[in-house]
Amino acid sequence: MISFLGGICGALAGILVSRFKIDGVTPVLASYSIPLALGVAISVGIVAGFYPAHRAASLRPIDALRYE
């Protein structure tokens, strides 16, 4: 959920910033970039959440408590 909201905020910021000209350069917003950015943000969030949870779930509870 956090990565989804971060992706939405990033996409909105990108849309807002693409409205401005910078020293004669006009930014172009490609239509595929918004879903691609959301997909990457969600994918990174899922991997960053799933990998540590999977490692923690594979430990025996006594071994996890021993190292704390």
Image: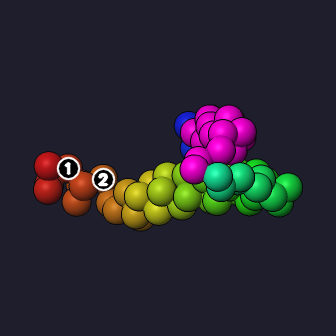
Task: Say above or below: 27 vs 20.
Answer: below
The local crowd at label 2, few if under 14, some if 14 to 19, many if 20 or more residues have their Cα within 10 Å, is few
Q: Nearer the viewer, residue 42 or 18?
A: 18
Q: Secondary structure at mark 2?
A: helix
Q: Residue drawn 30% across and 53% down? A: 61
Extreme residue toward the right, this view: 31
Specify start and end residues of the magenta stretch as a single range.
5-23
Asked if the residues shown at circle 2 and circle 1 are in contact, with their CB atoms under 8 angstroms apart, the answer is yes
- How many numbered marks have been drawn onto this rendered protein structure? 2
Q: Quadrant of residue 52?
A: bottom left
What residue is pinned by disc 2?
61
The x and y percentages for residue 62 are 23, 54
Q: Residue at x 76, y 55 (%)?
A: 28
Which quarter of the image is occupied by the N terminus? top right
Q: Main secondary structure of the magenta part?
A: helix
Residue at x 64% of width, y 52% of height: 24
Q: Which residue is mark 1?
A: 65
